[in-house]
Amino acid sequence: MPEGHSIHRIARQFRANFAGRTVRASSPQGRFAAGAARLDGRELTEAKASGKHLFLGFGPELWLHVHLGIYGAWDFAGEITVDDTIASSRGRIGQTNQHGTVVGAARGAAEHEDSLASIGAPRRARLHMAETEKASSAPAEFPPEPVGQVRVRLLTDTAVADLRGPTVCELLDDAGVAAVLDRLGPDPALDGSEQAEDEFVRRAAGKTQPIAVVLMDQSVVGGIGNIYRAELLFRHRLDPFRRTKDVGEQTLHELWRDWDHLLAEGIRTGQMLTMDGLDEQALQRAMASRADRHWVYKREGLPCRVCGTSIAMTEIAGRKLYWCPFCQKP
DNA sequence: AAAACATGCAAAG
DNA sequence: TTTGCCTGTTTTC
């Protein structure tokens, strides 16, 4: 279920707790036994994300490539770093100032940094990372017994990471990683350059498919899922069904920059906050209820926050699409 | 408590 | 086009 921000946070977790460590690798479930055997005893050297894809490097020419799909999750335990704004309570989100503006909102790739004030020294804990995150107290024993269908377990002296339910879990060499990255569209959190922005516009601009479909096409731009798609379209008051070639390059550039902004916020907070500038009260409501968290996503039949029109929903390309028929008129 | 649903994707048919 | 993944969350009974 996770969209791009979650995968970047998982990559960061691996950098913080596993990079530079020798790992024991196994497949408690058995379905990745051969792959785990090849990883076993090697050093985890690198962790990066592009779109919804995670790449863990194990020295030269050996990568673990993971895609979580809908059900996938990583569970960390042991001596691990924890983002305390998430914690077990589902968290307080970023400080807001008197204008209701989010303070410290990242504005680009340069600000996607690992060193966040909210992440302290490693401590004994457990951390579930999927589309949402939940921290809890550490299991009594280390390493803990695998729970459920653990495809891969990566274990250091002090930390363990269990992968369950992935759509993709495979080993690649450098060329294999390059091939995957090549078929993926640019990801502003991986590459916030102007070239990446131009690449997105180039990949999108000529398409006759609806903009709602193209935004979720991972070969056009990385990391946008069903929620960010719906919310981006509303934020730009765009008719979801307009052919992408008719959207205009200016708007495509604006969509890229807004995605950069939302993704940076998602990575920073661990939450998909798609309504900027909420006051404290609205923020509390948003945290308490999904229906109060977004402009249109999962708000079918509820009044549009801007014009009061009933939010519409239909299925397009097998996924539910939410939009305001008035604000996002053709 | 049980059922329905989902913030994807790839493989199978 | 359908199925499998294999789980957490939300909704319904």
Image: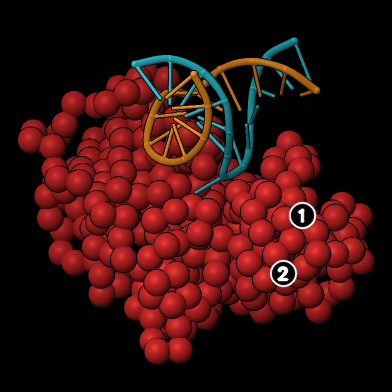
Chain colours: A red, B cyan, C orange
Left or right: residue A13 versus residue A228 is left
Residue A113, percent from left and from top: 38, 72
Residue A322, percent from left and from top: 70, 51
Q: Residue furthest bottom?
A: A98
Say if mark 1 contacts mark 2, CB within 8 Å: no
Query: Depth check: A46 or A306 in front?
Result: A306
Residue A35, percent from left and from top: 41, 28
Q: Nearer the viewer, mark 1 or mark 2?
A: 2
Quadrant housing residue A77: top left
Residue that badge 1 annotates: A212
Residue beneath the point at 45% across and 47% down: A131
Would you say residue A268 is visible in this rendering?
no
Left or right: residue A25 versus residue A208 is left
Three-letter amino acid code of the residue under disc 2? Cys
Residue beneath the point at 38% across and 65% down: A284
Would you say residue A29 is visible in this rendering?
yes
Three-letter amino acid code of the residue under disc 1? Ala
Residue A145, percent from left and from top: 18, 26
Quadrant housing residue A51: bottom right
Q: Quadrant of the C terminus of chain A?
A: bottom right
Residue that badge 2 annotates: A307
User: Please, what secondary structure does the residue beneath circle 1 have?
Assistant: helix
Query: How many residues crowd mark 2 within 10 Å: few (<14), some (14–19), many (20+)?
Result: few
Chain of the residue that carries numbered disc 1 in the rendered image: A
Label 1 to label 2: alpha-carbon separation: 21 Å
